[in-house]
């Protein structure tokens, strides 16, 4: 039963909430205990909120998931957890989030609320509207970053926000691209209606634009006058190759290895991606915190 609830809450998906730590890392307060604790609380609250959204989404999609060759194994469509028990779990999560987030900056509290409402709209309507589906996903990541800045009360670079937007758009587009490839099976295509409005050529073109925008925006962030002034160094530009490699590696996994439908699985199982991420964090930390 514990394992089934673990799957219901999508615990591995919590890795996406690490975006909350982005402002902390670039605020030069990463090793400040008080700032780190605040960001950690923000991360935990977004983990509970995202799990709440997943449970609600699974309750809504239970019939469609039963027809999906993979999603039918989830706790709700497989019958391992009843709809009533899932609703109870969602209620408990809602209460936890409601009374936890209110203890922090009102802007952070509002961001959590906006994130929750946006995802409700996504679950009920936006996921079936072409383009708005991927922009809704991107907005969710941007809200995480903004909330991470609000909870520790720091400003965040516009270039960094744009980078976040484009990288989340890129991941969402690549997910749709993978789903389209797998939709050769009729039942799979039927489980996500919005796929009928996309094509492989269209998603390929969008992915190219988004990938290019990620690299350009991040590169411009590293050399912007505000960034150089805050960190008193131009060395941050040397972290750009890690970003480029990450984008290219992800495209390789989707286009060549036929992966990409599960973003989290790639992030936590592909060794080159893991090592690249760790080296990026190490290099950024060394540069930002004046070790080099």
Image (cartoon, helix red, strand yellow):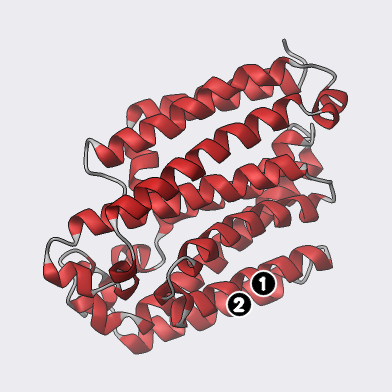
In depth, the one of 38 and 59 nearer the eye is: 59
Give the residue at the far left of this rendering. 185
In depth, the one of 264 and 236 nearer the eye is: 236
Which corner quadrant of the image does residue 271 belong to? top left
Residue at 28% in and 79% down: 81
Q: Tag on residue 117?
A: 2
- At numbered mark 2, what does the secondary structure look like: helix, strand or loop? helix
C-alpha span from label 1 to label 2: 5 Å
Q: Which residue is mark 1?
A: 114
Q: Position of residue 131 (x, y in %)?
A: 47, 65
Q: Is mark 1 in CB contact (under 8 Å) with mark 2?
A: yes
- At numbered mark 1, what does the secondary structure look like: helix, strand or loop? helix
Residue at 61% in and 33% down: 216
In depth, the one of 1 and 39 nearer the eye is: 39
The image quadrant where one finds the N terminus is bottom left
Say left or right for 291 vs 1.
Answer: right
Say left or right for 258 vs 8.
Answer: left
Q: Where 121 falls versus 69 (above or below)?
A: below
Which corner quadrant of the image does residue 97 belong to? bottom right
Give the residue at the far bottom of this rendering. 84
Q: Position of residue 143 (x, y in %)?
A: 66, 59
Q: Tag on residue 267?
A: none
């Amino acid at each position: 039963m514990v394992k089934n609830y673990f799957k219901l809450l999508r615990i591995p998906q919590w890795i996406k909430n690490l975006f909350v730590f982005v402002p902390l890392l670039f605020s030069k307060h990463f090793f400040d205990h008080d700032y780190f604790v605040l960001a950690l609380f923000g991360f935990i609250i977004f983990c509970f909120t995202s799990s709440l959204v997943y449970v609600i989404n699974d309750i809504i999609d239970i019939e469609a998931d039963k027809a999906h060759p993979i999603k039918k194994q989830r706790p709700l469509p497989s019958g391992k957890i009843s709809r009533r028990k899932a609703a109870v779990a969602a209620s408990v999560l809602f209460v936890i989030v409601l009374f936890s987030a209110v203890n922090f900056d009102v802007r952070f509290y509002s961001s959590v609320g906006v994130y929750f409402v946006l995802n409700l709209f996504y679950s009920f309507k936006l996921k079936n509207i072409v383009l708005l589906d991927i922009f809704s996903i991107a907005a969710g990541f941007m809200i995480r970053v903004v909330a991470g800045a609000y909870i520790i009360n720091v400003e965040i670079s516009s270039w960094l926000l744009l980078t976040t937007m484009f990288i989340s758009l890129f991941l969402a587009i690549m997910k749709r691209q993978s789903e389209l490839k797998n939709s050769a099976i009729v039942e799979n295509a039927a489980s996500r209606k919005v796929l009928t409005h996309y094509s492989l050529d269209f998603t390929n073109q969008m992915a190219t634009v988004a990938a290019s925008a990620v690299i350009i925006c991040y590169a411009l962030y590293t050399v912007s006058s505000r960034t150089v002034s805050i960190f008193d160094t131009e060395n941050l530009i040397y972290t750009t190759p890690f970003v480029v490699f990450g984008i290219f590696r992800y495209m390789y996994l989707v286009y060549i290895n036929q992966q990409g439908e599960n973003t989290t699985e790639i992030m936590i199982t592909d060794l080159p991606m893991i090592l690249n991420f760790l080296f990026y964090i190490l290099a950024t930390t060394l540069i930002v915190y004046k070790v080099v």
